[in-house]
Image (cartoon, rainbow, N blue to C red):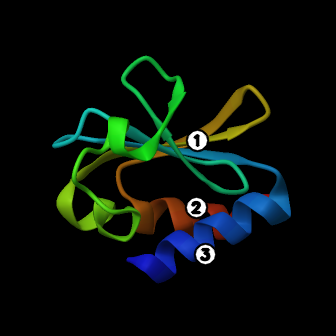
Amino acid sequence: MLKLLERLISISRERGIKIEVSFSRCRGRLLIDREIKALDEYGNVVPWNRAFPGVAVQNVLDQCRVRKVEVYRGREKAFEASDLESALRELSSYR
């Protein structure tokens, strides 16, 4: 899963897109915007331990089940996927 996160960060940097990951078992959300950021339930950037208490960055995908992945170009939503693998497949064909 760590390789998947690294690949998504790389795509975000190369193409200038934002990837927001929502989870079903955790209140916090993950934002990949050239780097990994933690979001609270209101969409504010917060310290990691406030959004994901007791969960390390490298373990968040294993401990919190992905509910949806939203990809944004600027403020416009480009597409939505149900998991990270399908989002990565969609991103590989998205320009």
**Mark identifier at residue 79:** 1
Residue at 38% over, 70% down: 58
> What's the CA distance linking mark 1 and mark 3?
18 Å
Quick one: SS at disc 3?
A: helix
**Mark identifier at residue 7:** 3
Query: Based on the displayed image, in which of its 4 quarters is residue 27 positioned?
Result: top left
Report the quarter where the N terminus lies: bottom left
**In the image, residue 42 above or below residue 92:** above
Q: Give the side of residue 59 with respect to residue 95, left or right.
A: left
Quick one: SS at disc 1?
A: strand
Where residue 50 appears, as percent x and y from the top left, is: 35, 36
- List the single residue furthest toward the top: 42
Decide: few, some or many residues near mark 2? Use Cα within 10 Å; few <14, some 14-19, many ≥20. some
Query: Based on the displayed image, in which of its 4 quarters is residue 13 positioned?
Result: bottom right
Sooner in the amino-acid sequence: mark 2 or mark 3: 3
Q: Is residue 48 visible?
A: yes
Amino acid at circle 2 = Glu
**In the image, residue 62 above or below residue 71:** below
Where residue 35 appears, as percent x and y from the top left, is: 66, 57
Amino acid at circle 1 = Phe
Task: Name the residue carrying label 2.
Answer: 90
Quick one: SS at disc 2?
A: helix
Mark 1–mark 2 CB contact (< 8 Å): yes
Amino acid at circle 3 = Arg
Q: Is residue 94 visible?
A: no
Residue at 83% over, 65% down: 14
Decide: few, some or many residues near mark 3? Use Cα within 10 Å; few <14, some 14-19, many ≥20. few
> What's the CA distance linking mark 1 and mark 2?
9 Å
Decide: few, some or many residues near mark 1? Use Cα within 10 Å; few <14, some 14-19, many ≥20. some
- The front one of 91 and 9 is 9
Q: Give the side of residue 39 with respect to residue 41, left or right.
A: right
